[in-house]
Image (spheres, rainbow, N blue to C red):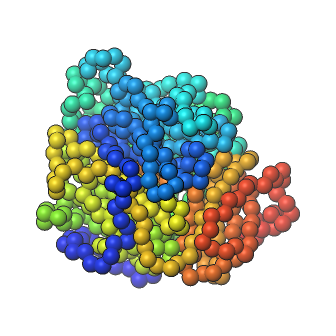
Amino acid sequence: MKSFLVISLFLPFLFFGQNVFSDVTSNSGIDNIYDVYQGLFGGGVVAFDYNNDGYEDLFITGGQGQDVLYKNNGNGTFKNVTKESGLFKNKVIVTTGVSSADINKDGYIDLFLTTIASQVDNSKRNKTLSPNLVYINNGDGTFSDQSSKFRINKRNFSTSSSFGDINADGFPDLFVSNYFKNFYFEESPFNTHNLAILNHYSINEEYETGEDEIYINVEGKYFKEVSNLLIDAGKGYGFGGVFTDFDNDNDLDLFIINDFGETSESNRLLVNMYPELRFENKSRELKINFGLKSMGVAVGDYNNDNFLDYHVTNIFAGPFIVNRGNGLSFVNLMNNVGTGINKIKSFNNYEAVIIGWGSLFLDYDNDTDLDLFNSNGPINPMVNPIPNILFENKGRVFELNESSGVMDYGIARGSVHFDYDNDGDQDIFVVNQRPINDMSYRGGVVGSKLYRNDSSNKNNWLKIKLKGNQSTTRGLGARVKVVCDDLKMIREVDGGSSHASQNTSIIHFGIGNNMKIDSLIVTWPGGKKQYQTNILPNQLIEIDELYIEEPSFFDQIINFFNFD
């Protein structure tokens, strides 16, 4: 593979040609901006179909403002249905991140919200840490707060969460990332900037690092805390974690990212020892224990070698972590693949440090390889403009697409990809924070953005919607492989990634100019495989999990020789 070194890149932002993405926010009915708490934390979003009508909706956390549920009308527009949904906040609760899963397996997708603080009475001085929130989907367009029933009662300074079935029992389990162990509110916490005013990007040392949590889902009835499974994982100022099968052994491992962390523990990779309910910390052995100041993570196989790779956003260029598989250690190739951009020029010729938050692997042009989108934003209120970036995959090397149409200058945090208009290409949504101290730039405050993919290529595509029966309803963590002649591509169903967010659970493949998919293999958590052949492109197919008591002889042969 040809490689080159990129240390820093300064861009003039002269745009030529037609934009790939169009900003359709104003015409879509979306009017949103995240009301940030103390400048730094939050801005999560999830793309999910809460009413099972075939169109993916958006839930956006509100910070100290209102959370919002936008119903997709199916005609390119959205409707704010927060009040009628039961998700309207009737007291001040600072929400940060969100993930979704069918917790009770009733066929409807539920929500889990991470929180920081709550106002326990009308006094601005009476603030406390808040429990996280479980909202169960009632199946009639409404949700109900069932946090206590599901035993989510701990009060933590939580940032994000991720769902995945770690014991392959068919019920989604839960990881919660915590930033501080304790946090001491001052007289007016909603009007101060203690977290935002950082000294050379460092957190006040008086706040102890958080302790992450993990919960087993007990038959959809409640969550049982089993955080002892993380006992050797160290501590860190947690910004997120993602369940992912990095070693292709059919169980979900856990990749945890930290902001500043402790010197001895930065990002960590915990290997699932299924069928034992146990994780082992393999971070140092696999050389993935780098990347302080990490904010978000993307999961995807960028080079189509059938091993999942990881991109981590950061202050300055984030690690581009390439998985070599076969028990080999990871390598950080950010300076080899073209994503190693540390600084960038803004519209006013100001040299700004890249501060990345959300990260997405997506094949926006359906050409069979995964591109990379990063939502970037300054530490509020230090609002020196930083544009979002779309890196186009040019065959294992990335080039910045200056005509992407997504390079706005909002204070970006979480971001997701989804096909909101069901036209076969991946669109992008970005959550932007409101500048505190009424600071603004370039004509005013930039709200959250919906970017429609208007790519003009004629490449083919395939979308797969999984319906788990023995597995989780949406097949969280399942791995899907498609084979077209000599080309083999894999995708993994997202349980929560980017920054405090979660992408669509519908798997998307760009097929390029291929006119047929030779075979499709679904590997459900636990190792059961399901096959389809001779599939035509440019369609959404739904795959209903077959009930398999024991692997067939054919399946055993396939697994033994790893034919797929």
The residue positioned 34% from the left and 61% from the top of the image is 23
Asked where in the image residue 149 lies, by quadrant, the reply is: top right
Task: Indicate whether 140 appears above or below 320.
Answer: above
Q: Name the foreground residue: 487 vs 562.
A: 487
User: How many numbered discs sit on the rendered protein?
Assistant: 0
**Is residue 210 visible from the viewing direction of this image?**
no
Q: Name above or below for residue 467 compared with residue 115.
A: below
In this rendering, does residue 72 appear at all?
yes
Q: Does residue 252 lie above or below 361 as drawn?
A: above
Image quadrant holding the N terminus, namely bottom left
Q: Residue at x 31, y 73 (%)?
A: 403
Displayed quadrant of residue 16: bottom left
Q: Position of residue 88 (x, y in %)?
A: 43, 31
Whole-percent x, y for residue 445 in the image: 22, 49
Furthest residue in direction left, as rendered: 349
Residue 535 image position (x, y, % from top left): 69, 73
Identity of the residue drawn at 37% across and 24% down: 91
Direction from residue 426 to residue 316 in the image, left or right: left
Question: 537 and 304: which one is in front?
Answer: 537
Is 550 situated left or right of 28 in this image? Answer: right
Quarter that holds the C terminus: bottom right
Question: Where residue 204 appears, x then y in whole percent?
Answer: 24, 36
Q: In the displayed structure, would residue 62 be above or below residue 350?
A: above
Residues 461 and 53: in front is 53
In this view, the residue farthest toward the right is: 553
Q: Residue at x 56, y 38 (%)?
A: 141
